[in-house]
Amino acid sequence: GENVEQHPSTLSVQEGDSAVIKCTYSDSASNYFPWYKQELGKRPQLIIDIRSNVGEKKDQRIAVTLNKTAKHFSLHITETQPEDSAVYFCAASIGNDMRFGAGTRLTVKP
Amino acid sequence: NAGVTQTPKFQVLKTGQSMTLQCAQDMNHEYMSWYRQDPGMGLRLIHYSVGAGITDQGEVPNGYNVSRSTTEDFPLRLLSAAPSQTSVYFCASSYSEGTINGYTFGSGTRLTVV
């Protein structure tokens, strides 16, 4: 099955800086790549997603890029704010089988 | 519109006991799934369903059963609880037209097996 690796496991940035989280996937048939944000004690929530026919997608301060050749995708958060502090999960999906990365704990220091 | 509702929120079981975690959604989503979340391991897929009467195994199905008799409900059964099943369990659903879309997650069930 699909295997998703996520790096780094922890990331600390200063407020206003950018944060980048990277994921790689193993199965070239994967065609859907969502990113989820999970605040402490809460459920994961979808923040952005991208499909395999698109190379980049942006929504205000967050953007996702996809490199199908290299089988990796990244989440970019610009102008980070303390409320961006959370655990972020990437995922890759082949049809109905979605696999998640292990998560990145992002801390934004004021 | 309640979204995805999971019950109970917390549960403590003794080794060998059985129980059912409930999941219901009111969004007419075809696709439902169960994940477990363990520290440092992200979310791992247990079972999923693409519609009423259809279920399939995910990455870590052993020790769990599911059924999907209605579109709204997707219960997860632990047959004989083991300490290794101590985890936080999330149910998720999605509207699907042959390809998966973003999930809506329930609020989770924190299960401890002693």
Image: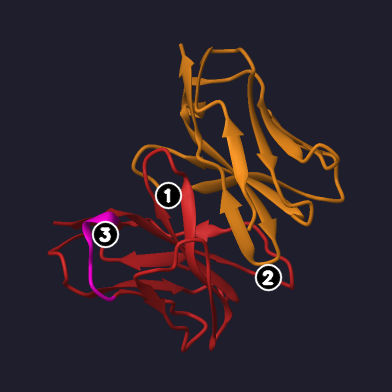
Query: Which residue occupies the foreground of this view, B104 or A51?
Result: A51
Residue B96 is labelled as 2
Chain that appears orange: A
Locate the C terminus of chain B by quadrant: bottom left
Q: Amino acid at mark 1?
A: Arg
Return the x and y of residue A60 as percentages of the image width and height.
71, 32
Query: Which residue occupies the foreground of this view, B49 or A13?
Result: B49
Residue B27 in which image quadrant:
bottom right
Q: Which color is chain B depicted in? A: red
Question: Which of the colour schemes (rainbow, by chain, secondary structure, one colour) is used?
Answer: by chain
In the image, taking residue B84 as reference, residue A91 lies left or right, namely: right
Q: Chain for mark 2? A: B
Q: Chain for mark 3? A: B
Secondary structure mainly formed by the magenta segment = loop
Return the x and y of residue A66 as percentages of the image width and height.
79, 39
In the image, taking residue A81 as reference, residue A29 lies left or right, namely: right
Residue A100 visible? The answer is yes
Q: Is B96 above or below relative to A58?
A: below
Alpha-carbon span between mark 1 and mark 2 = 21 Å
State the residue position of label 3. B9
In the image, taking residue A13 as reference, residue A72 lies left or right, namely: right
State the residue position of label 1. A43
Residue at the spot 53% in from the left edge and 89% down from the top edge:
B53
Q: Are marks 3 and 1 on the same chain?
A: no
Alpha-carbon span between mark 3 and mark 1 = 12 Å
Identify the magenta region.
B79-84
